[in-house]
Image (tube, grey):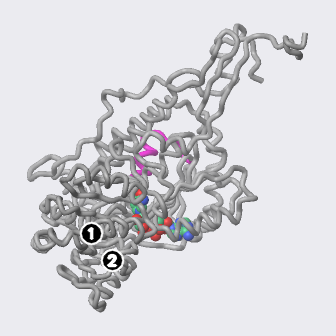
Amino acid sequence: MFSLVRKVIKPSVYLQRFGTERCIGSVVQHLKLKESELKNEPVLSYEKNSKERKELEDNLKKLSSKCEEVPIYIGDKEYKTNDIRHQVMPHKHSHKLAKFYYADIKLINKAIETAVETQKKWDRTTIEERLRIWDKAADLMAGPYRQELNAATMLGQSKTVIQAEIDSAAELIDFIRMNAYFLKECTKYQPISENIKVTKNSLRYRGIDGFIAAVSPFNFTAIGGNLAYTPALMGNAVLWKPSDTAVLSNWVIFKIMLEAGVPPGVVNFLPADGPVFGDTITKSPDFAGLNFTGSVPTFNRLWRQVGENINIYKNFPRLIGECGGKNFHFVHPTADSETVVTATIRSAFEFCGQKCSACSRMYVPETLWPKIKSGLIEKQKTLKIGDVSDLTSFTSAVIDDKAFARITSYIEHAKKSSNLEIIAGGNYSDKIGYYIDPTIVVTKDPLDKIMREEIFGPVLTIYVYKDSDLKKAINLVNTSTQFALTGAVFAQDESFLRQALEEFKMAAGNFYINDKSTGSVVGQQPFGGGRMSGTNDKAGGPHYILRWTSPQSIKETFVPLRDIDYPYMR
Ligand code: NAD
């Protein structure tokens, strides 16, 4: 079909034959962003009397004064079912922030049908057009909707202003802009054509026929946006199941993307019961991929279901899962103690330790322990825990009653165990909100469950090792848990730092030297972990988009084909 003589194909005919995809053999020109301009979205400061602070306060007031209706959205229609749910403010759980509806099996199947149909058209939309939409979306997020995104994230997920700003503003905007930029860049590569007068080789980036399921966690608004809209950018159609405890902020993203020009049906918004959603999508022959971020047990269950159904699918489904962590800070005897204290307090306790990258276990040499211990206790006392609308709060409440029960069970375990001692915090109350004090535990047993399991809350446990047992302590970091998400090493000794790069090579997908284990930035530290922490597809890096394309190679020959035999045969 591609053996066409070049001179008879005019550009207009070429487009008719191959659809509207114009990037075959050419580089996509659009997108304001040039390489030299590829910059992260600035993080605003919210100082008193600043414009952004005033706008944020207005939005906090507006969202607090109502209970937003969030529908199910399939194609261009809104749906509501009788299965009504509410998103509450975790720091004041009597306050209902949003009312939403669980999609049932029938609606999930309807969304699958809509997505599969829409994908065929959407995949023919030029990359330039898609980039234009993404550009507009980023501008809307950075401008008129920034504070609505932040207010929804603060009130719904109990993030302080800075935690919201780096997530629902900066990171989200970066994902939208940079993934578009990475797509533009990757179209620059075209395969070798040895003699362009004879044959031309090209590569085009197709979506995958079928649908992609995006299943997002509560803890980062930006992750929801990335999981749903990066596959969409690449020509796929998506069913987006947000987390129950992040519905409002995710709904704001969905509305912005529609306004920017993403056609209805490209992304379908489906709050739903997790297992009902998972069971339904994995039973569809059109299931083409899962873009998941959440816990290991949920990802394991979905992977198992995909395995059980492998014979029914039209494509081998792509499975991306970014999961949990048991992130470490490892302190060498030459470390700067003050840096260790500051970095650890931030990493372990910002957003109540509910970042997948939060430091949860620390290894400290005996010689530095007195200084680090007093530093941690002193700093812990200064942390103000409260309502997120009070901008002097350092952190707020944990996400819901289930998280509260799980996290406090580890604190109770620490109180009961003779191997464990709580040196700071340990109190909690769910009377008004799900509040847990930042808690610091010291363990005599480096393999206690508190050092091995993901707690996902404000509990840090420390094991003090003898300086002479450095090698053993390194071994503990590597072998105590099933995870390998983030880790940090603190040392001044250059030769040890070089050694640490080798020793901890497999212990973390994101590794930090003399810095905290949290705070990765899109385009700067592409993110993801190994082992049971996930498939490590490095969101925020240039290769991530390639997971969501099924490229097609095209060879076009411009000379008539005549000979069956080869010259040597003559
Ligand atoms: P979770 O696994 O409970 O839920 C994640 C999502 O899966 C939610 O939308 C939930 O409703 C849905 N779900 C639950 N059961 C399902 C099923 N059977 N089928 C389909 N969907 C189902 O996780 P969470 O509490 O929302 O998030 C916290 C976890 O996410 C932690 O383990 C954290 O480490 C991890 N996380 C990892 C990263 C990373 O990049 N590695 C980033 C953020 C969070």
Residue 191, horizontal then vertical, whole percent? 59, 24
Viewer-closest of 100 and 380 = 380
Viewer-closest of 421 and 87 = 421
- Left or right, 300 with respect to 429, comes to right
Q: Is residue 247 visible?
A: no
- Contact check, label 2 and label 1, Cβ < 8 Å: yes
Reading the chain from its start, which is encountered first: label 2 or label 1?
Answer: 1
Q: Is residue 187 above or below residue 535?
A: above
Q: Residue at x 21, y 83 (%)?
A: 422
- Left or right, 154 with respect to 214, comes to left
Extent of the magenta region: 252-265
| Residue 259 is covered by the magenta coloring | yes
Corner quadrant of residue 542: top left
Residue denoted by label 1: 363
Q: Residues within 10 Å of mark 2 (few under 14, many from 20)?
A: many
Q: Main secondary structure of the magenta part?
A: helix
Q: Residue at x 36, y 48 (%)?
A: 172
Residue type, mark 2 in image: Pro
Residue denoted by label 2: 446
Identify the secondary structure beneath mark 2.
Answer: loop
Q: Is residue 204 visible?
A: yes
Viewer-closest of 180 and 17 = 180
Residue 500, horizontal then vertical, whole percent? 32, 55
Give me the C-alpha separation between circle 2 and circle 1.
9 Å
Identify the secondary structure beneath mark 1.
Answer: strand
* Picture quarter with the N terminus: top right
Residue 346, horizontal then vertical, whole percent? 21, 62
Residue 328, horizontal then vertical, whole percent? 31, 65
